[in-house]
Image (cartoon, rainbow, N blue to C red):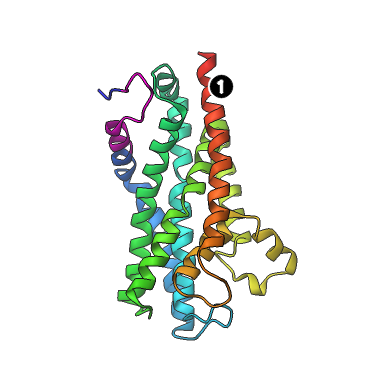
């Protein structure tokens, strides 16, 4: 049985078990990993080695980064279903009567989401480089993948919020609205350059746009100063979302 310290510090054993449990969800893993790969094969193969005029990167590289961001975001947001299921069987109530803090609960979910996202990013990049021969320096692939992986945190927090507030009957439609909205308006499906101007303005407010952007900057895209700006925006999203999650967890715990 997992133990929790009296001070409410995060139990390492609980984090390990939570991450392991998530990674054993084979059906979710196959769906999450297959969708971005299929989209990469379809869209990435269509334009080959052409250069994207906006980023000055190989179009296949741009598509790979979009699909890596898309897959990582999907992996993180899918944690919402696990939390909704836990609430439906009363597991969250059991956690709240232990000394497990709100921060401990949140961090355990974020780590599980990031483990899930890491696998998706690696698979997508491997398909692009080995299968489609996407051309980019290894250090650039590493910087882009690491940036996207770190940028997953706000989406894991969004998933926790959905899991905390959504009822089981509304979890699926709410997830689809949030996920599709972030993917489309953030430019992960269609380049913003071909969208109306107002969509470009909306995109700059969304974490999905900056998730894709931090990958592009890591890959050496032309047209921006570096990874600092997207990192700061994603960090601001994470701080605000984390505060709301901890507040909600503490309020629920006070009701017990």
Report whether residue 37 is seen: no
In terms of image quadrants, where is residue 203? bottom right
Q: Is residue 1 above or below residue 132?
A: above
Q: Look at 39% across and 66% down and name the residue there.
A: 143
Q: Is residue 168 above or below residue 152?
A: above
Q: Position of residue 50 (x, y in %)?
A: 49, 86
Q: Position of residue 116 (x, y in %)?
A: 36, 49
Q: Is residue 158 above or below residue 47?
A: above
The residue closer to the viewer here, 53 or 67, is 53
Report whether residue 161 is seen: yes
Q: Which residue sits furthest left?
A: 1
Q: Look at 42% across and 16% down and name the residue there.
A: 97
Q: State the extent of the magenta-drawn residues as a range.
A: 4-18
- Confirm whether the magenta stretch covers residue 5: yes
Q: Look at 54% across and 14% down and name the residue there.
A: 255
- Confirm whether the magenta stretch covers residue 162: no
Q: How many marks?
A: 1
Q: Is residue 200 left or right of residue 240?
A: right
Q: Is residue 62 above or below residue 47?
A: above
Q: Is residue 202 left or right of residue 211?
A: right
Q: Secondary structure at mark 1?
A: helix
Which residue position is annotated with label 1? 251
The residue closer to the viewer here, 190 or 58, is 58
Q: Position of residue 71 (x, y in %)?
A: 44, 58
Q: Position of residue 39 (x, y in %)?
A: 46, 67
Q: Look at 41% across and 56% down and name the residue there.
A: 149
Residue density around tag 1, few if under 14, some if 14–19, many if 20 or more, within 10 Å: few
Q: Which residue sits furthest bottom?
A: 50
């Amino acid at each position: 049985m997992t133990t929790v310290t009296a001070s409410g510090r995060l139990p390492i054993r609980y984090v390990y078990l939570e991450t392991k449990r998530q990674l054993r969800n084979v059906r979710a893993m196959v769906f999450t990993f297959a969708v971005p790969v299929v989209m990469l094969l379809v869209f990435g193969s269509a334009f080959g080695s052409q250069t994207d005029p906006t980023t000055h990167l190989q179009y296949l590289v741009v598509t790979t980064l979009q699909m890596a961001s898309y897959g990582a975001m999907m992996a993180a947001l899918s944690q919402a279903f696990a939390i909704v299921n836990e609430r439906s069987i009363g597991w969250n109530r059991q956690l709240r009567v232990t000394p497990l803090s709100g921060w401990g609960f949140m961090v355990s979910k974020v780590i599980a989401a990031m483990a899930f996202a890491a696998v998706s990013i690696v698979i997508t990049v491997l398909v692009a480089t080995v299968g489609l021969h996407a051309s980019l320096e290894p250090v650039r692939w590493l910087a882009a993948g690491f940036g996207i992986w770190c940028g997953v945190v706000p989406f894991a927090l969004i998933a926790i919020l959905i899991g905390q507030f959504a009822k089981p009957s509304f979890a699926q439609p709410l997830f689809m609205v949030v996920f599709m909205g972030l993917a489309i308006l953030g430019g992960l499906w269609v380049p913003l350059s071909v969208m109306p101007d107002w969509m470009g303005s909306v995109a700059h407010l969304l974490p999905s746009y900056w998730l894709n952007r931090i990958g592009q900057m890591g890959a050496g895209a032309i047209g921006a100063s570096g990874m600092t700006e997207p990192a700061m925006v994603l960090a601001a999203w994470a701080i605000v979302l984390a505060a709301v999650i901890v507040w909600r967890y503490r309020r629920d715990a006070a009701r017990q």
